[in-house]
Amino acid sequence: VPAVKETRTDTIAPKERSAPVVKKEQPQPIGIRVISLEQFTRLVQEKRTLILDAREPEEYSKGRVPGAINIPYLSVDQYFEKLAGYPRDTLVAIYCNNIMCPLGRGLAEFMVELEFKHLLLFEEGWDRWEREEMPIEH
């Protein structure tokens, strides 16, 4: 008589593990690097970088970083030919109002599409520049 094999029905299923929580940083598009106030200040002082102000013309006319050119992101299509005239390897630093302002990042991403390769984003922007009492052009 062959032996009957018992199967256990009281086994405990393995405890399900939840995936570890990984904090994801906002991905930086290729070619865009966020810079600090100190880095931005050095670039402005060296005058070897194209500084772009992505704010609206009304804000730009009230005050801007010395040497900055206004390319308002909300009407960037009107400035396509102007931007297209710069060499794609130009070092470009972009700012808008502050870290919550999407205009600077929007302009930088637009310039990535135009194949600019060296884009710097000063996310703290005009608000920080003004708060630190940095030089202002009117």
Image (cartoon, grey):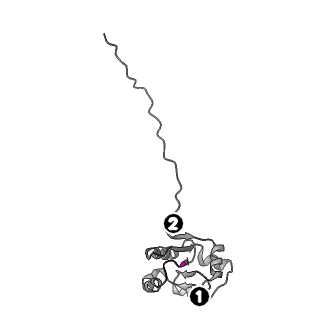
Q: Which mark is residue 62?
A: 1
* Structural crowding at the residue carrying mark 2, measured as other residues with C-alpha within 10 Å and reported as few (<14), some (14–19) or many (≥20): few
Quadrant of residue 136 within the rendered picture? bottom right
Residue that mark 2 sits on: 28
**Rendered view: 14 above or below 5:** below
Q: Quadrant of the N terminus?
A: top left
Q: Earlier in the sequence, mark 2 or mark 1?
A: 2
The magenta segment is 87-91
Q: Which mark is residue 2?
A: none
Whether residue 115 appears in magenta in the rendering, the answer is no
**Judging from the image, what secondary structure is the residue with disc 2 in?**
loop
Is residue 101 visible in the rendered image? The answer is no
Q: Nearer the viewer, residue 81 or 61?
A: 81
Q: Quadrant of the C terminus?
A: bottom right
Point out residue 106 in the picture as x, y percentages from the top left corner. 48, 74
- Please name the residue shown 49% across and 68% down the image: 30
Point out residue 131 in the picture as x, y percentages from the top left corner. 66, 77
Q: Nearer the viewer, residue 74 or 86?
A: 86
**Kind of residue indicated by mark 2:** Gln
Is residue 67 visible in the rendered image? The answer is yes
Q: Nearer the viewer, residue 117 or 103?
A: 117
Viewer-nearest of discs 2 and 1: 2
**Rendered view: 96 above or below 19:** below
**Kind of residue indicated by mark 1:** Lys
**Judging from the image, what secondary structure is the residue with disc 1 in?**
helix
